[in-house]
Image (cartoon, rainbow, N blue to C red):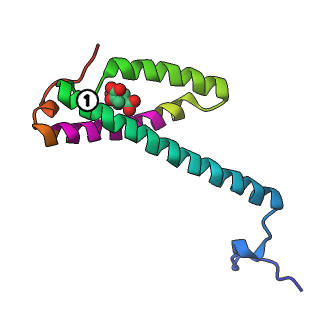
Amino acid sequence: MEERPTSDTVRTTTAVEIPAEILRLRGSIDNIDAAIVHLLAERFKCTRRVGELKAEAGLPPADMGRERAQIERLGSIAQASGLDPAFAEQFREFIVGEVKRQHRSIADERDGSSTDGPDLFA
Ligand SMILES: C=C(O[C@@H]1C=C(C(=O)O)C=C[C@H]1O)C(=O)O
């Protein structure tokens, strides 16, 4: 006979069968996660090169004019696609924060001067 959980027994996840639809959805979630990692890897390849070109040109790591345009554009895209725009902005900020950290480190490796300059606020 199947043992029923009581207040002092803990039901483990293995005790209950996982519905087939959840398993199917997890297959898609895994594919999406893989795509996100591939896309991020490609994005960081591009931003790393932008960091090198900025350091060569003596440009600062951050460009707040560009970021304002990104925030506006991605906010509209998030809204239209049913993603919370606040979450989209947190995610953008997380990624771009790492990009700027990498740009500062590229500039520092070159001559150590670019981190001392102001961000671009055009
Ligand atoms: C990549 C750049 O540098 C920074 C990083 C950005 C990004 O990751 O999209 C955008 C603007 C900059 O603050 C850039 O200027 O294009």
What residue is shown with label 1?
53
Judge from the rendering whether residue 77 lies leftward or rightward of residue 14; answer left or right: left
Label 1 sits on a secondary structure element that is: helix
Judge from the rendering whether residue 63 lies leftward or rightward of residue 29; answer left or right: left
Q: Is residue 38 above or below residue 96?
A: below
Q: Is residue 47 above or below residue 33?
A: above
Q: Quadrant of residue 36?
A: top right
The image quadrant where one finds the C terminus is: top left
Image-quarter location of ligand 1: top left
Q: Position of residue 35 (x, y in %)?
A: 58, 46
Q: Is residue 99 magenta?
A: yes
Q: Quadrant of residue 41?
A: top left
Residue range corresponding to the magenta coloring: 90-107
In front of the other: 114 or 8? 114
Q: Position of residue 16 (x, y in %)?
A: 78, 71
Q: Position of residue 13 (x, y in %)?
A: 70, 71
Task: Name the residue rendered at 52%, 25% in the picture.
Answer: 74
Q: Is residue 70 above or below residue 15?
A: above
